[in-house]
Amino acid sequence: MDQLGNLGPLAPLAGSWEGDQGLDISFNHALGKVAETPYKERTTFAPFGPVENGKQILYGLDYRTAAWRAEEDEPFHTEVGYWLWDADAGQVMRCFMVPRGTVVIAGGEASPDSRCFAMRAVIGSEVFGILSNPHLDRTARTVEYLVTITVLDDDTYSYEEDTVLAMDFMDDLLHHTDRNTLRRAADRSGP
């Protein structure tokens, strides 16, 4: 079986993607309130594997993503990480880091032919958990992360993310949400 055939539900994502329909809803420090920010995005997924952890065998996608506000040249958000498929366990996983100092390992169940799947992480969990640097832990702690991926066709996929934050100046939890629809692009060397 070729490498893409071992990626289960992640196989359709291999390649380069671009989307300009992004919407970020989060606290905007410059405005002092929750605001909507449209964005464009570029993501690359490079297949790899197998990775052997004893009896566990994983296949995955090495990924890089960057997002830009419509009027800016420099990305306001970047991520690096891995999306993993464990066929025996029927699990998809997303392991990533953002340069603000947060690391997330999210996971969920899927079948090899799933076209829609979700991955979740919760602070304090020793599996599928979240870590932050000391400053963010005090001021903007991520307490839960959920992403749902929907492969619409061979050249289009969408996602919806909900990053739940405990902000030091807010009484209630803040749901920082992002969503976008991406289309397959000409292969590039990276975001």
Image: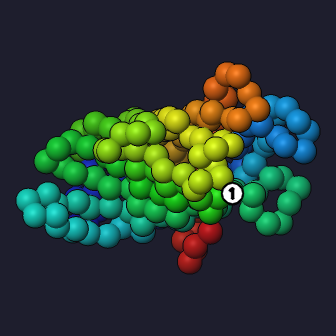
Instruction: State the residue lying farthest toward the left.
Output: 55
Q: Nearer the viewer, residue 115 or 94?
A: 94
Q: Does residue 34 appear in this view? A: yes
For image coordinates 51% across by 44% down, the residue present is: 157
Answer above or below: position of 3 versus 8.
below
Where residue 99 sits: x, y (%)? 62, 63
Quadrant of the snapshot with the C terminus: bottom right
Answer above or below: position of 61 versus 21.
below
Quadrant of the snapshot with the N terminus: bottom left
Is 136 left or right of 119, judged from the image as shown?
right
Instruction: State the residue lying farthest toward the bottom.
Output: 189
Question: Colour mode?
Answer: rainbow
Instruction: State the residue lying farthest toward the top.
Output: 172
For image coordinates 85% across by 32% down, the residue present is: 33
Q: How crowded is mark 1: few (under 14 residues within 10 Å), some or many (20 or more)?
A: some
- Quarter of the figure with residue 170: top right
Where residue 77 sits: x, y (%)? 69, 57
Is 1 left or right of 187, judged from the image as shown?
left
Where residue 20 sits: x, y (%)? 72, 49
Q: Nearer the viewer, residue 35 or 43?
A: 35
For image coordinates 41% across by 61% down, the residue present is: 82
Tag 1: residue type? His
Q: Which of 141 and 82 is in front in this view?
A: 141
Is 114 left or right of 146, judged from the image as shown?
left
Q: Does residue 1 appear in this view? A: no
How many labels sit on residues?
1
Pointer 1: what residue?
Answer: 77
For image coordinates 53% across by 47% down, the residue present is: 156
Q: Which secondary structure lies at badge 1?
A: strand
- Quarter of the figure with residue 42: bottom right
Answer above or below: position of 158 versus 72.
above
